[in-house]
Amino acid sequence: MALCVGLIGFGTVGSGAVKTLLANATQIQQRAGTEITLQAIADLDWETDRGVDVSNVKRTTDAWELIRDPDIDVIVELVGGTTIAKELVLGALEHQKDVVTANKALLAAHGAELFRAADRQGRKIHFEGAVGGGIPIIQTLYGGLASARIREIHAIINGTSNYILTQMGEHGRSFETVLREAQKLGYAEMDPSYDVDGNDAAHKIVVLASICFGTAIPLEDVYTQGIRDITVEDIRFGEKLGYRLKLLAIAKDLDGEVEVRVHPTFIPKSQLLAWVHGVFNAVNTYAEGLGSTMLYGRGAGDWPTGHAVVSDLIQCARDRLARRPADYAYFYTPAKSLRPMSEVITEYYLRFVVKDQPRVLSKIAGILGEHNISILSVLQTEASRDNVCPIVIMTHKAREGDMLHALSQIEELDVVMAAPKLIRLEHMNPQRG
Ligand code: HSE
């Protein structure tokens, strides 16, 4: 029996999914073990040309028509957002349909409720397209890495931010100009603040961490810092010291506690992740015994995410044929607590703007020392005409709470001319090799 699909939302990803279904129809049927038939599409806009012929598919503006249609087995939700999309997904599950979605915001905010509903209804939610676009990270975690005890994830999962940081670093271009370009290229979210303020990456790391660590992660408690305050100057200082700046999504399983955070991060150039440029995404997992595994690819766009959606449809068809049950309990069971940011231990890049005069460095170093913060290296460049100069300090590992106390005292010094700049630094699995 064919798998009958109802597609809600015929935008960039929706049209990519339809193009994939048409382009690879024979192979898809072979791999799914059954034909995958696009029964109907719901969208409010039937004027825009999507570059794909759907004249033989039923078209409507009423999404609920698809949900109520008894012939449809699976609803593909590509509406986006967390309000209407949530009602549609819950409605689809209640009507005994499986769901395929690429909506990371929805899963991160309401995953507990949705997966509980799926378990109750004995239905499945597939979401390969929600994280990393065309990178098959979700099915890899459920499949090839299912045996692995993953302890750390370091991920570049927002292409827009990575594109901006790459352009700023390589060409010294301004944040605003590059953001506008990313929007034109179709990578940015409808509201680009989701990209540059780190929320999109936070949504995605919540999904990955829940799967990897088997625990619910409250999105609102995830430390999230974007790239708005990043300057070309900081990127260049980091380069000089051997580091690349990335908006990193980080998750760690620390036995009983988990750490989940998103912020601009310096990583040594010797790490593969440092070489992920432009709109590309990459996810590096570290598992005991297995070591590091990295997936790299296109994290957004019509074809890449369309592929992810269709691979979910194939998975959906296989699961139905095999009558394979789902168990999403870990998405809504808080098995481990989230470590507060003040307790996070990491290395730091600090930049101070100071008066170039005697004892300045010793005053700053003294305060850091009093807070148990050990200096790794110091870089000072020549003062400008007004006798002000930057000092960059790299530190050994320190507790975030200690660091923030120290910085607030340093900011009070009369020789310090601006708020100190802090950028965290990560080595992938340093102690574990
Ligand atoms: N706006 C996202 C990004 C793409 O820039 O990576 C979709 O997740």
Image: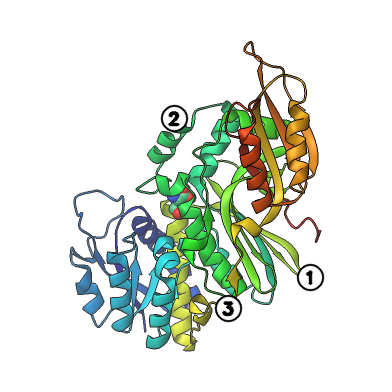
Residue at image location 50% in from the left, 57% down from the top: 202
In this rendering, position of residue 85 left or right of residue 306: left
Frontmost of labels 3 and 2 is 3
Mark closest to the chain's N terminus, 1 or 3: 1
Say whether mark 2 is within 8 Å of ligand 1: no
The one of 408 and 287 positioned closer to us in this rendering: 408
Residue for badge 1? 289
Look at label 2 and name its amino acid.
Thr
Residue 331 in percent (x, y) is at 50, 76
- 69 in relation to 386, above or below: below
**Would you call the spot at circle 2 few (<14 residues within 10 Å), some (14-19), or many (20 or more)?**
few
Give the quarter of the figure containing the C terminus: bottom right
Residue for badge 3? 335
When asked about the image quadrant of residue 288, the answer is bottom right
Q: How is the image coloured?
A: rainbow
Look at label 3 and name its amino acid.
Ala
In this rendering, position of residue 85 left or right of residue 123: left
Mark closest to the chain's N terminus, 3 or 2: 2
Callout 2: SS: helix
Residue at image location 52% in from the left, 73% down from the top: 216
Frontmost of labels 1 and 3 is 3
Callout 3: SS: loop
Q: Answer yes or no: is residue 33 visible.
A: no
Look at label 1 and name its amino acid.
Gly
Residue at image location 73% in from the left, 19% down from the top: 357
The one of 36 and 412 positioned closer to us in this rendering: 412
Residue for badge 2? 177
State yes or no: discs 1 and 2 in contact (Cβ < 8 Å): no
